[in-house]
Image (tube, helix red, strand yellow):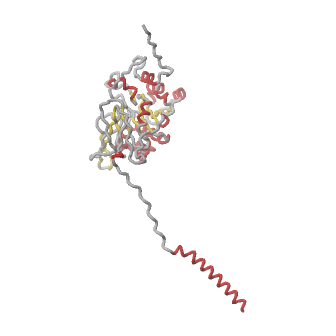
Amino acid sequence: MHIASVGVSKICFLFSLAFCGLLLLLIPALQPSVRQVDLPKPRPAQMGTSHRVRVPGDFLHAGDKEIITGPKRSSAGLGKPIKTALGARRTPERGVGGLSEYRSRDKLELKDIFIAVKTTRKYHKSRLELLIQTWVSQAKEQTYIFTDGDDKELQVRTGANIINTNCSAAHTRQALCCKMSVEYDKFIESQRKWFCHVDDDNYVILPSLLRLLSSYHHSQDIYLGRPSLDHPIEAAERVKSDGSVSVKFWFATGGAGFCISRGLALKMSPWASLGNFISTAEKIRLPDDCTIGYIIEALLEVTLTHTYLFHSHLENLQKLPTDTVLEQVTLSYGGFENRRNVVNIAGELSLTEDPTRFKTVHCLLYPDTEWCPKLKPQHKN
């Protein structure tokens, strides 16, 4: 009996120890939870004078003055254009404080730029071959030609990056927007810093393009180009079935070429990527370059930076001062009032040999090109 009572006592003692241990474990859980301290929220950016962007200079009309502005909108919802200062090369303003608030200059190389050339199958020989022979030969890896038909012979012979978009060959709004949609998606895939679009009648002066884009940073919201109109375009947004809303915006004409920073291009994605560009264009019923301006100016509220360094066949190219031709970013030819519309520049090639003057420009930029005529030696009397 004594032995049995001892056994019961031991069991009770062990049970008490187990219960105390369990109680110790449960005490922290039974205490009220400690309130977490809220993390500090990011300080809102203050839009002071240190955030204003001084737009880098162009190199044509020294009389024009620069405008210092940000992407502000007017009371009517219309952003005033930023015009680049011509004839000056100023360093953009930096933010105050130890850390720069405004990243301006970009250490840029040609490999950082994605150049898209829009063309069509019927112009492969008459237009595209000239580009491949001239400026594209200096940027073959950076240039992508978007067309509407296969041309294996041209691709093998020249080594050019020719992309068949499988879009219609018709010069319609739908076909143009189809090609631009493919251009945008290919650029996003490329991971390059800058997207530049030109047409198949443009000569791109690569050193000038690099100099211009290096004045900015690819992470900024930059939309560079030249409008073909002297006023913003007006479009009707088909918002509801019973009505529409009118919107005004500037756009850079695709005929002169335009450039978009990667930072801005990524923000365009909801309206431009994976075929959305086509549906956006249908909403406002406007062509590809107008749709680009609509997305950037009207939807994202980023102001177009107007530059006089881009040129299309819609302007009188003969008025371009001869001594500034090689400082431009793009050139074109033909189309102005049905006259011979080319830049006025002298060289070893005659107008008959070089009706577009693209070869003359190329030989002045790259005189060692194999097919360029060698300068004739000056004979002394």
> Could you tell whether 135 is left or right of 44 in the image?
right
Q: From the viewer's side, name the closer residue of 327 and 354.
A: 327
Residue at the image point whose x is 62% and y is 82% from the top: 16
Residue at the image point whose x is 49% and y is 28% from the top: 138
Q: From the viewer's side, name the closer residue of 357 and 117.
A: 357
Q: From the viewer's side, name the closer residue of 71 and 65.
A: 65
Q: Quadrant of residue 131?
A: top left
In this rendering, the answer to whether 20 lies above or below 1 is above
One can see residue 165 in this view: no
Q: Quadrant of the C terminus?
A: top left
Q: Quadrant of the N terminus?
A: bottom right
Residue 241 position, x and y percent, is 32, 49
Outermost bottom residue: 1
How many numbered discs?
A: 0
Outermost front residue: 98
Residue 22 position, x and y percent, is 59, 77
Q: From the viewer's side, name the closer residue of 205 and 20.
A: 20
One can see residue 95 in this view: yes
Residue 193 position, x and y percent, is 46, 40
Q: Quadrant of residue 260?
A: top left
